[in-house]
Image: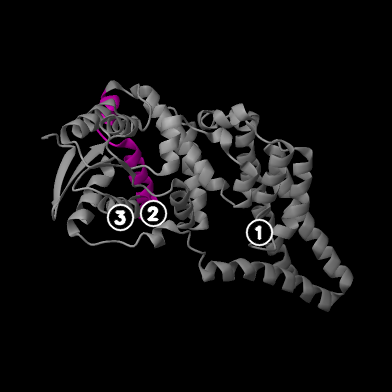
Amino acid sequence: MTDPDVHRLTIGEREIVLVGTAHISKESADLARRVIEEEQPDTLCLELDTARYEQLSQGEKFEQLDVKEIIRRQQLMPLLLNLVLVSYQRQLGGKLGVSPGTEFIVAADAAHELGIPLSLCDRDIRVTLRRAWGAISFWKKFLLLSSVMGAAFEDQEISEADLQHMREQDVVTRLIEELGAAFPGLAQVLIYERDTYLAEKIRRSDGRRIVAVIGAGHVSGVRRILESQVGADLTPMETIPPGSWIWTFLGWSMPAMILGAMLWIGWQRGAAAAGGQAISWILITGVPSMVGTILAAGHPLTILSALLAAPITTLTPLLGVGYITAFVEAYLRPPRVYELRSAAQDVGVFSKWWSNRLLRLFLVFILSSIGGSAGMFAGSTRLIRELF
């Protein structure tokens, strides 16, 4: 085919046809079907992992989320990023009159009709999101969260010219590239790693003739890697790397300094002075976290848990107060099925963050964490002043 979005590669004795698509484009879906019917490949590769393929083919199944288990694994923020991305795709897809990922389902249907095996070549979305979240600093996390939340509530008018432009490009990859420019750690995980991962999975797929349907933004990277004929080890890209020892050291050094300061005050001024400092620490860290939970409209017992947990969790880097309050809130007021189903749509509506129980979990987590962090900073500053 002579379409500019179709790229034909000859790698040794194999022929690989890359079809670059926009994820919310009917034209891309039609092109994918046409290429598959004309090429009759031995294998069809798709830029999907198993979970996303099931979501697209069977519908989003956020109602099956085990929220308590997600909180135990400390995966709330990757889940929030996923919800916002799904919401963003749905908003654009609604304006364009096509569901996000339609080209993949159309391609898969064409392959099933022709008896062509499928190869799902993308990395598990949960691994990608967790690696992306772990690749940026605390400050960058805050900036990213602010950007994402701003994008979630933004609903700009789109002109016909803009719509036409969106139909001709992979807007989701464009969004990721823009995020990558502002957050280089994200670009490494979301773009370059996935280019390598996709290329290697395509390379490992069976057959001498392969058609691969991937986002247009990945075509150049995947093509370059395939043509280099250099294999890649996928294992490191499928694991969640442990945190840096530097951050571990810094995470423990602050609690050690605070406890050391209290002990020093007790040794110099007596037990009563140390006890007064301990009570001050409890109030200075617990009250702001409690206020944040109140602002999130948390359950009364969740509010109490913030007051009790913040003074302790601020003295350890192992668990933040936000995960305690979120777990308590999820236990006391678990999200209902219809709220889980509507979460990706509700995330873009400001008032829904208080009425949808899943979104309120995020609010409880975020605002109680901010309160606890602010209290820890204020309390640490006060302790340092007391030493001098």
Magenta highlight on residue 160? no
Q: Amino acid at mark 3?
A: Thr
For marks 1 and 2 on the same chain, the one whose residue lies earlier in the sequence? 2
For marks 2 and 3 on the same chain, the one whose residue lies earlier in the sequence? 2
Vertical placement of residue 169 versus 49, above or below:
above
Closer to the eye: label 1 or 2: 2
Read off the magenta span.
161-190
Does residue 354 appear to the left or right of 120 in the view shown? right
Closer to the eye: label 3 or 1: 3
Cβ atoms at labels 3 and 1 below 8 Å apart: no
Q: CA distance from mark 2 to mark 3?
A: 10 Å
Main SS of the magenta part reads helix
SS category of the residue bearing label 1: helix
Mark 3 Cα shell of 10 Å, populated few (<14), some (14-19), many (≥20): many
Question: Which residue is the site of mark 1?
Answer: 377
Q: Which x, y percent locates residue 346? A: 54, 29
